[in-house]
Amino acid sequence: MNGQGILKGMLVTAKNFFGSYVSRERLTTVSYPEGGNTIKEQSRNIPFLVFDGEDPVAGMRCTACQKCEKACPPQCIFIEKDKDERGKALQRPKVFDIDASVCMGCQICVEVCPFESIWMDSNFELSTFNRFEGLQFNREKLLKSNTYFHKIHPQQAQASDDRLAEKERKRLEREAARRAEKSASEPQV
Ligand code: SF4
Ligand code: SF4
């Protein structure tokens, strides 16, 4: 019958409209900002860097391997390795910048990171009067705690923690095997 689709659509709309008075499930809009952040767990915009523990620099997971920098399609990541006092490169970034006005939220940086360090944020309140200063995110601005990661993406953060724990377990196993091999090869006195 002609118009059946329109009738069906109107029925769904009416059901949700009247239903929203009795069930919060059917209320799909909130008053912002009073209603708070209703962003879904799967949402993403620009990346952030995770750190473990309390100290952002000491707990940084990033090793400055620069894989994300090379893979980023619009080339909006800039990394400079940190150095010790003798000029030897350290496995952490001194500079880690993302130009958020260029980032397209593709998540490729997340996919290529071997150290569970870079993840997508859900912070959508990024408006600024000056895109050249306000949208240049430096290391300090990008670093966020693992607790924050668990708050915005609990499932992803837990899976990441589990992978890191498994990696550490394997590392300890390899170390123990090496030690056992070494002591077995030492002459007995
Ligand atoms: S999300 Fe995409 S565009 Fe943005 S920094 Fe990562 S790789 Fe680059
Ligand atoms: S965020 Fe990941 S891929 Fe990028 S430099 Fe750090 S460790 Fe490497």
Image: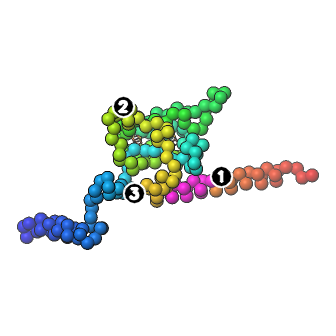
Residue at the limit of the structure toward the left, as seen here? 2
The amino acid at mark 2 is Phe
Task: Indicate the secondary structure of the residue bearing disc 2.
Answer: helix
Q: Amino acid at mark 3?
A: Glu
> Which residue is at the front of the view, 137 or 7?
137
Answer yes or no: disc 3 within 8 Å of ligand 1.
no
Kindly indicate whether the residue at mark 2 contacts the one at mark 3 (C-beta within 8 angstroms). no
Name which quarter of the figure residue 39 lies in. bottom left
Q: Which residue is mark 3?
A: 41
**Residue located at (51% from left, 58% from top):** 158
Q: Is residue 26 left or right of residue 181?
A: left
Density class for disc 3 (Cα within 10 Å; few <14, some 14-19, many ≥20) is some
In magenta, the rendered stretch is 158-168
Measured as percent of width and height from the top left, residue 118 is found at: 48, 45
From the viewer's perspective, is the residue at label 1 or at label 2 nearer? 2
- Inter-mark Cα distance, 1 to 2: 43 Å
- Residue 129 visible, this orientation: yes
The residue lying toward the viewer, choosing from 23 and 189, is 23
Place residue 137 in its image quadrant.
top left
Q: Which mark is residue 171?
A: 1
Marks 1 and 3, the one that precedes in the sequence = 3
- Give the left or right position of residue 23, taking residue 175 as reference: left
Mark 2, residue position: 132
The secondary structure that dominates the magenta segment is: helix
**Could you tell me which residue is drawn at 46 percent across and 59 percent down?**
155
Q: Residue furthest top?
A: 86
